[in-house]
Amino acid sequence: MTDTGPNGELTLRTLAMPRDVNVNGDIFGGWVLSQMDIAGGIVAGARAKGRVATVAVDAMKFIRPVKVGDVLCIYVTIGRIGRTSLALDVEAWVLRGRAGKREKVTEAVFTFVAIDEDGRPRVVPAEQEVRS
């Protein structure tokens, strides 16, 4: 598999630590998923201009393991905006070792719903046109 590089906006960078390993000594997939969810929530909340909740994770594909000491980098692209929901393409890449070799480790589509203060779905506001 040859990836040309990450797609989307770099939204989150964090370091994989020993406390997050699974029984094989690799970073637990659930930890990686949670970092992707955090990054997706940042982008979805900004675009929805308020609270959002994760409602689905689709097409999760683990490509390579994450190792202790890797720098995990999460990239997010807004794929689709519906009336109350947003689908985001989320990619996780790592920078390995001191050489900083970049490798894609996982990807998924996260769907968020915009919610009001009572936790009910609300309309995602239209994007405002920037005037110069």
Image: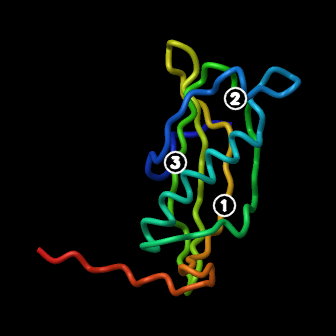
Q: Tag 2: Cα neighbours inside 10 Å, few (<14), some, or many (≥20)?
A: many
Name which quarter of the figure residue 83 lies in: bottom right
Mark nearer the N terminus (3 vs 1): 3
Give SS at disc 2. loop
Between the C-alphas of marks 3 and 1, the distance is: 12 Å
Around disc 3, counting alpha carbons within 10 Å, would you say few (fewer than 14), some (14 to 19), or many (20 or more)? Answer: many
Residue 6, percent from left and from top = 51, 43
Q: Is the residue under label 1 in contact with that under label 2 (CB below 8 Å)?
A: no
Please, is residue 51 above or below residue 41 in the view?
below
Q: Position of residue 50 (x, y in %)?
A: 46, 72
Residue 98 against residue 5 in the figure, above or below: above
N-terminal-most mark, 2 or 1:
2
Element assignment for label 1? strand
Q: Position of residue 100 (x, y in %)?
A: 50, 20
Q: Residue at x 22, y 75 (%)?
A: 130
Residue of label 1: 109
| Residue at 57 percent of width and 73 percent of height | 86
The residue singled out by tag 2 in the image is: 66
Q: Secondary structure at mark 3?
A: strand
Choose top left, top right, bottom left or bottom right for residue 46.
bottom left
Residue type at mark 1: give it: Val
Image marks 2 and 3: residues in contact by CB distance under 8 Å:
no
